[in-house]
Image (tube, rainbow, N blue to C red):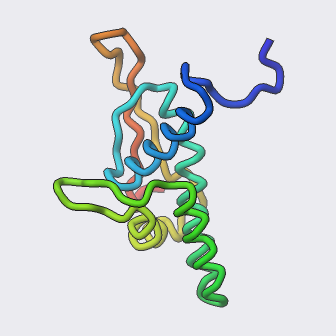
Amino acid sequence: MRHRVQGRRLNRNTAQRNALRKNLVADLICYEKILTTEAKARTIRPAAEKMITLAKHGIVKGKEDPVREVHARRLAASRLPRTRVVEGEEVNVVKKLFGELAPRYAERPGGYTRIIKVGKRPGDNADMAVLMLVADDEG
């Protein structure tokens, strides 16, 4: 029985699971849309939403005390990889999170991501899904 057991193991040990989560959240922040298995999408969705909320709160509280924004940026940097290569150029993940995504969702109270099921993967018949950030004009 799995009473009070949280999360999915994804056939990985703890270090691999944490690395997978960090990399998929960083990819979602950089590309704003990723194609992955449904189980992975459901696993990283809360982590991605918490990162956006962390950035939003950091910006809001940073207006009254800049130290709080620095603290939020450091927390985000500790939970995400530093850079990603997107279309041939390096993107700073934390800078994009705080510079583009947090202001975009400043008025939105939550629900920044959407999961759309896209069918089965041909090789192993795994359920696939697209995890994407919702458009800022929706809501």
Q: Residue at x 48, y 34 (%)?
A: 41
Q: Quadrant of the N terminus?
A: top right
Give how far across and how far down residue 137 sits, in percent.
39, 61
Does 119 sit left or right of 86 as displayed?
A: right
Q: Residue at x 20, y 61 (%)?
A: 89
Q: Is residue 41 above or below residue 63?
A: above
Does 2 sit left or right of 92 as displayed?
A: right
Give how far across and how far down residue 99 sits, in percent.
41, 73
Q: Is residue 105 above or below residue 5?
A: below
Give how far across and how far down residue 17 sits, in percent.
55, 33
Does 89 sit left or right of 110 as displayed?
A: left
Q: Residue at x 38, y 30 (%)?
A: 36
For this orientation, the residue located farthest to the bottom is 64
Name the residue nearer the viewer: 37 or 134.
37
Q: Residue at x 34, y 25 (%)?
A: 118
Dividing the picture into quadrants, the one containing residue 13 is: top right
For this orientation, the residue located farthest to the left is 88
Does 1 sit left or right of 98 as displayed?
A: right
Give how far across and how far down residue 85 sits, in percent.
26, 54
Number of marks drawn? 0
